[in-house]
C-alpha cells in the first residue's frame, strides 16, 4: 500500500506548481514528458527504530570554486553523516576534493570547525508516521542529534572531539568532550578509502559518458558484529558545463560600468539584456525572516516569468538551503526566472557556497551564472547604485528595480571571475 501510494505521489508531482515552473524554463512541454519510477534498495543499516547509512553524499568531476592546490578538473565532494537529505538540501556538511582529502578549507581553524560542523543527521524512522523525533516535511525522515549516532556506533568513523580546556579538536571520539563531525577518521586517518573510490568513479563515469558528471553515493561500514563495508553507487548524471570562450581579466573587475564583480563565480558564458534586478534589502535582512523573504521573491518571480522577463537575483546566505539560518529556503521553482544569481554574505550571514545540493545542479543544468560576493573579500556589489534605482515592486524585505540601461553578466569559467556591467 505504501509503495503504491509513493508511486502515485511521484506521478502526481508533475502537476505541482514547482514542476510546472521548472518546465517553463526549458524547451519541453508538459504533455510531451514521460516518466518512469525506479525502485532502488536503500543503502544503510537498522539501528533500533532508525535506518540509515553511516554517511552519504554527492561528488562532481568539476569543481567550480577550486582553492589551491586544487584544480577545477580535480572534482569536489560533499558528504554527511546519515541519509543524503543533509547534502541534497544544502545543510551543513563536509566538502573536500577527492585528490586532496586532507585539505578542508572550511575547517582551517578550531573556530571554523565549531561553526561549520554538522550537528544533526537524517534517518528513516521505522516507528511509523507521526511518531518519534521531528519529522522532515511530512516524510518518513527524522532528525537526530550526534548523541544518537554515538549510541548507534556510527559517529566513530566521522567524528572528532573538541576539548574546551585545550581549545583543540582531536580526531576520534575516544576522549571526553564535545562531539563534532569533521570526517577526520575517514579522510585523514584512512579508516575507509572514500576519497580514492570517489576519484576512481568520477574518472570512470566522466570517461564513459564523455562529459563532466555528478554522482550520488552512500556508505555502510561494518558494525560491532563485523562484516564488510559497502559503497553504494546510487546514480550518475551529466553535469552541464559550457565551453564558450569568455575572458574576464583582473582589470575587468574594476571598470567603471561594473555593478558587481567577483572571483568566486560558477558557470561560463555571457547573459545579455537583463532589464530587471530583484534583491533582498541588506538593511532589513535577518535570518529569522528567511521564509517570508522566500515567499516575497517567489511572487515577484512568478510575475516576471509570466511577462517573459529574465532577471538578476541578489540575496544573502545560501540559496535553496532548507535551513533558514544558512540562507533563503527557496525551491528552484520560486526563482527559476533568474538568469544570473548572486549569493552575498554579511558579517551575520557568512556561510559556504552552495556547491553540494540538488538546487545547485539545477543552476548548472540551466547554465545560470552564479556569483558569490563576500563582504570580507575584494568583491564588489554596488548597493548604492541599486538603492538609487526606482522600485517597480517593493515589499517588506525585497526590491524589484528596472534600470534604464540593461545589464550583462559575463563569466569566465577558466578563472572563476565574473562581472555584471551596465550595457551601453
Image: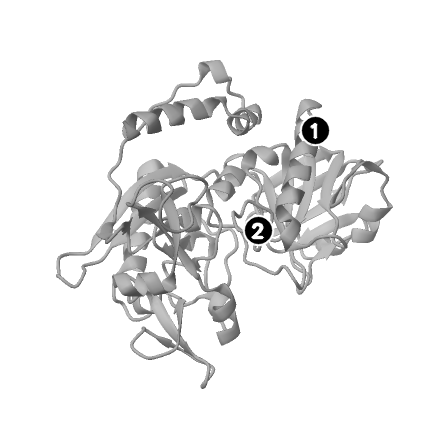
What mark, if any, has residue 324 been given in the picture? 2
Q: What element carries label 1?
A: helix
Lateral position of residue 273 relative to residue 235, left or right: right
* Viewer can see residue 47: yes
Q: Is 413 situated above or below 100?
A: above
Q: Which residue is drawn at 73% across and 46% down?
A: 397
Q: Are marks 2 and 1 in contact (CB under 8 Å)?
A: no
Image x and y of residue 389, in percent: 85, 42
* Viewer can see residue 68: no
Q: How crowded is mark 1: few (under 14 residues within 10 Å), some or many (20 or more)?
A: some
Image x and y of residue 344, in percent: 66, 53
Q: Residue at x 29, y 30 (%)?
A: 2
Going from N to C along the chain, the mark reached first, 2 or 1, is 1
Residue annotated with mark 1: 304
Of the two numbered discs 2 and 1 in the rendering, the one whose residue sits closer to the viewer: 2
Between 171 and 119, the one lying in front of the other is 119
Q: What element carries label 2?
A: loop
Lateral position of residue 41 relative to residue 106, left or right: left
Amino acid at each position: 500500500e505504501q509503495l503504491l501510494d509513493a508511486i502515485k505521489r511521484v506521478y502526481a508531482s508533475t502537476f505541482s506548481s514547482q514542476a510546472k515552473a521548472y518546465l517553463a524554463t526549458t524547451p519541453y512541454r508538459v504533455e510531451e514528458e514521460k516518466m518512469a519510477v525506479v525502485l532502488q534498495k536503500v543503502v544503510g543499516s537498522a539501528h533500533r527504530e532508525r535506518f540509515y547509512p553511516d554517511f552519504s553524499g554527492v561528488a562532481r568531476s568539476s569543481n567550480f570554486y577550486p582553492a589551491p592546490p586544487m584544480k577545477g578538473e580535480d572534482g569536489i565532494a560533499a558528504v554527511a553523516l546519515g541519509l543524503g537529505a543533509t547534502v541534497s538540501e544544502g545543510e551543513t556538511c563536509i566538502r573536500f576534493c577527492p585528490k586532496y582529502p586532507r585539505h578542508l578549507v572550511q575547517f582551517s581553524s578550531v573556530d571554523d570547525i565549531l561553526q561549520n560542523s554538522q550537528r544533526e543527521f537524517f534517518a528513516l524512522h521505522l516507528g511509523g508516521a507521526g511518531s518519534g523525533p521531528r519529522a522532515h516535511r511530512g516524510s518518513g525522515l527524522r532528525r537526530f542529534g550526534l548523541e544518537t549516532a554515538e549510541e548507534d556506533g556510527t559517529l566513530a568513523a566521522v567524528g572528532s572531539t573538541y576539548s574546551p580546556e585545550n581549545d583543540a579538536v582531536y580526531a576520534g571520539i575516544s576522549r571526553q568532550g564535545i562531539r563534532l563531525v569533521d570526517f577526520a577518521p575517514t579522510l585523514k586517518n584512512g579508516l575507509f578509502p572514500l576519497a580514492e573510490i570517489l576519484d576512481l568513479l568520477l574518472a570512470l563515469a566522466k570517461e564513459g559518458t564523455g562529459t563532466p558528471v555528478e554522482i550520488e553515493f552512500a556508505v555502510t561500514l561494518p558494525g560491532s558484529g563485523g562484516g564488510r563495508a559497502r559503497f553504494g553507487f546510487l546514480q550518475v548524471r551529466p553535469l552541464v558545463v559550457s565551453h564558450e570562450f569568455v575572458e574576464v581579466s583582473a582589470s575587468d573587475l574594476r571598470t567603471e560600468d561594473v555593478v558587481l564583480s567577483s572571483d568566486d563565480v560558477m558557470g561560463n558564458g555571457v547573459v545579455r539584456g537583463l532589464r530587471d534586478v530583484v534583491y533582498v534589502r541588506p538593511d532589513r535582512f535577518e535570518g529569522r525572516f528567511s521564509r517570508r523573504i522566500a515567499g516575497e521573491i517567489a511572487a515577484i518571480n512568478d510575475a516576471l516569468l509570466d511577462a517573459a522577463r529574465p532577471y538578476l537575483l541578489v540575496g544573502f546566505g545560501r540559496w535553496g538551503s532548507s535551513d533558514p539560518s544558512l540562507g533563503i529556503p527557496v525551491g528552484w521553482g520560486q526563482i527559476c526566472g533568474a538568469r544570473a544569481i548572486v549569493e552575498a554574505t554579511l558579517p551575520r550571514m557568512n556561510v559556504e557556497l552552495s556547491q553540494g545540493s540538488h538546487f545547485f545542479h539545477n543552476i548548472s543544468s540551466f547554465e545560470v551564472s552564479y556569483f558569490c560576493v563576500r563582504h570580507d573579500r575584494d568583491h564588489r556589489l554596488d548597493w548604492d547604485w541599486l538603492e538609487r534605482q526606482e522600485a517597480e515592486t517593493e515589499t517588506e524585505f525585497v526590491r524589484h528595480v528596472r534600470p534604464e540601461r540593461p545589464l550583462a553578466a559575463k563569466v569566465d569559467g577558466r578563472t572563476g571571475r565574473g562581472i555584471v556591467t551596465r550595457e551601453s
